[in-house]
Image: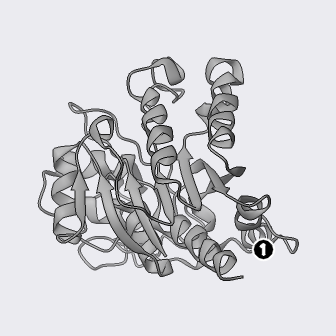
Amino acid sequence: MTFGSLFAGIGGFDLGFEQAGMKCKWQCEIDKHANKILEKHWPNVRRYKDVRELKNPEYVDVICGGFPCQDLSLAGNRKGLAGERSGLFFEAVRIIREVKPRWIVIENVPGLFSSNNGQDMRTVLQELVECGYSVAWRVLDSQYFGVPQRRRRIFIVGHTTRQGGFEVLFEANQELSQKVEKRMVQSHTLVAANGQINNRGSTWGGGIVISTLKAEGVNTMSRVEYVEQNGIRTLTPIECERLQGFPDDWTKGISDRQRFKTLGNAVTVNVIKWIGKRIIERNET
């Protein structure tokens, strides 16, 4: 299966889907720092910069992307889909109409639920349905997919059949609920960037979960502080990469400030891999 990546960032969707067994055909990302990371890891993939200028790209089986959340986030200005950034969702809809992929996967913050008193979520779903897709949505939390980070995000999966999206996000035996009960995160070890296990011989997989990584803006480093025995310290870029499911040094090559920012904007690779595998399984049946 092939996919095209809108609002690609540093490639969270792209890496997760490739780990699931898909192939990236094209990417679209406007941020110059994120593009540097994409070019490093996908040097031969066609890349577009501005979603507003992307016209009739190559056909793919899946179009994915997390459209900008700045106008939807509870920490933002709450202009919703009327905002300049989050309103780029409608450009994604235009591209979906042009390409007509079999699958679509959209991600955003839970603030979408309350934006414009719930009307923006309704608009998103209605627009996708009018494109010809049956859609299902679910909130997934990264901490139950093998990384010790609380990160709740809305995932919307659409397919050209009636049940496709629902079968990806839900199943009768409630597999995901079982994962929650077993606390997958407790078996995950996140060591410090210097190769030591923290500084005290303990692991971060023993039930300690870090709060959500955030992108605070150009002038502020996005960071999460970790409480250790001897005080509070800022997480390193490598630790933030691990919290998002990326390999070590995935974002190496840009400033630490930009590494924190782009990682705060990224989707968790492990979650995307889980969705991607389930799409492939349903696509083959």
Q: Amino acid at mark 1?
A: Glu
- Name the colouring of the figure: one colour
Task: Report whether 102 appears left or right of 165.
Answer: left
Q: Please, is residue 80 above or below residue 269 in the view? A: above
Q: Position of residue 139 (x, y in %)?
A: 67, 50
Q: Please, is residue 63 above or below residue 83 in the view? A: below
Q: Observer-nearest residue: 175 or 197? A: 175
Other-residue count near label 1 (Cα within 10 Å), few / some / many at <14 / 14–19 / ≥20? few
- Residue at far right of view: 172
The residue drawn where x is 23% and y is 62% is 46
The residue drawn where x is 47% and y is 61% is 268
Residue where numbered disc 1 is placed: 175
Q: Can residue 244 be seen?
A: no
The residue drawn where x is 68% and y is 22% is 119
**Location of residue 218 by image quarter:** top left
Q: Please, is residue 12 above or below residue 124 in the view? A: below
Task: Report whether 126 appears left or right of 204.
Answer: right
The C terminus lies in quadrant: bottom right
Q: Position of residue 24 (x, y in %)?
A: 36, 69
Q: Can residue 159 be seen?
A: yes
Q: Position of residue 247 (x, y in %)?
A: 32, 74
The residue drawn where x is 79% and y is 58% is 162
Q: Observer-nearest residue: 193 or 152? A: 152
Count of all numbered marks drawn on residues in the image: 1
